[in-house]
Image (tube, rainbow, N blue to C red):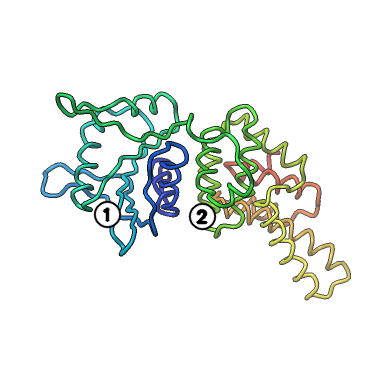
Amino acid sequence: MPTTEHEALAELFRYQPELAATLLRDLLHYPVPPYLRIEVADGDFSQAMATEYRADRVLVLRGARDRPILGVIVEVQRNVDDEKRWSWPLYQVALRARLRCPAVVLVLCLDKATAAWAAQPIALGPGQRLRLQVVGPGALPRSFSDAAASRLPELAVLSAMTHGNDSGGVNLVLQTLAALVHLDEERGRFYTDLILARLNETLRQELEIEMQKYEYQSEFARKYYNQGLTEGEARGEARGEARGEARGETQGKARSVLAVLEARGVPVPEEVRGAVLGCQDQARLDAWLRAAIVVKDATALLRG
């Protein structure tokens, strides 16, 4: 999995290349031509030059007869870096020459200052200026329908990462987490971690309160809750114990806590695992399950 936020954001376009076309067409109103498919391509523009030039992600839109009709260079920019203003024009020209079709540079910025800097035209020579396609916080939606979030969860993830800490952002985060339940486990865990890593402590606490208030309304929580509960009930029934059903439910909740932590990639020390599996207090297990969705450190459960 990606080790930095920069790499992780670039991965969104590998998982879902359609995200680039949506950002260009729907948010920036760029005239994206009708295409039949979109693919991830090689982002190395070093060619025969001594300096290495490598874009974060390159996508190719293809039309009839699989002909390239638009090349998209995706660059994730997290801070101001004037060196990029020398390499970005090269990327666009090199991809245009490689594909023999128009090319565009799409820059993704999660803060306003960097977006404003990236949007400044790049002087190429007398009377020649290159204007990039820049997606910043102002372009990313602050709300969307449940259907839209499910159709393109990557856009919802970007919005939650950008606006999650704003006033009312907790609802945006909850809605996005609910949309992730239909993804495969790897993508769901990856996208959830991306969102939670951007949230400040105040928002994390607000998110935990909302989870307690609405009793597992997050589909993400319910998915792992039901998974553990089913496993626990099955074991209780198999043993045929008089109290198997109640014990199975308790064990199911305990395993749900561990499943959520593991799905998010949060390390679970043996002391925490033992305490969770040995707990017979269903109210405490319920509280731990809600907390497991937002905590960064599994030992925080035992301190709560």
Quarter holding residue 255: bottom right
Please, is residue 134 above or below residue 182 in the view? above
10 Å neighbourhood of mark 1: few (<14), some, or many (≥20)? few
Q: Residues within 10 Å of mark 2 (few under 14, many from 20)?
A: some
Residues tagged 1 and 2 counted as in contact (Cβ below 8 A): no
For the residue labelled by badge 2, is the local secondary structure a helix, a strand or a loop? helix
Residue type highlighted by circle 2: Arg
Which tag, 1 or 2, sits closer to the chain's start? 1
Q: Which structural element holds mark 1?
A: loop
- Residue drawn at x 35%, y 57% as measured from the top left: 39
Residue 264 screen position, x and y as percent: 56, 50
Point out residue 82 in the picture as x, y percentages from the top left corner: 26, 27
Q: Residue furthest right?
A: 242
Task: Report how far apart the C-alphas of labels 1 and 2 lie in the structure.
Answer: 22 Å
> On screen, 113 above or below 274?
above
Total marks drawn? 2
Reading the image, the residue beneath label 2 is: 187
Residue 160, given in percent of the width and then of the height, sits at 55, 38
Q: Nearer the viewer, residue 281 or 31?
A: 31
Closest to the camera, between mark 1 and mark 2, is 1
Q: What label does residue 78 carry, if any? A: none
140 w.r.t. 21: above or below: above
Describe residue 61's horizontal placement relative to residue 91 as left or right. Answer: right
* Residue 94 x/y as whole percent: 19, 46
Of residues 171 and 191, the one nearer the viewer is 171
- Residue at the image point whose x is 40% and y is 37% from the top: 108
Identify residue for label 1.
Answer: 42
Q: Quadrant of the C terminus?
A: top right
Query: What's the amino acid at mark 1?
Result: Asp
* Front-lying residue, 222 or 111: 111
| Nearer the observer, 140 or 239 | 140
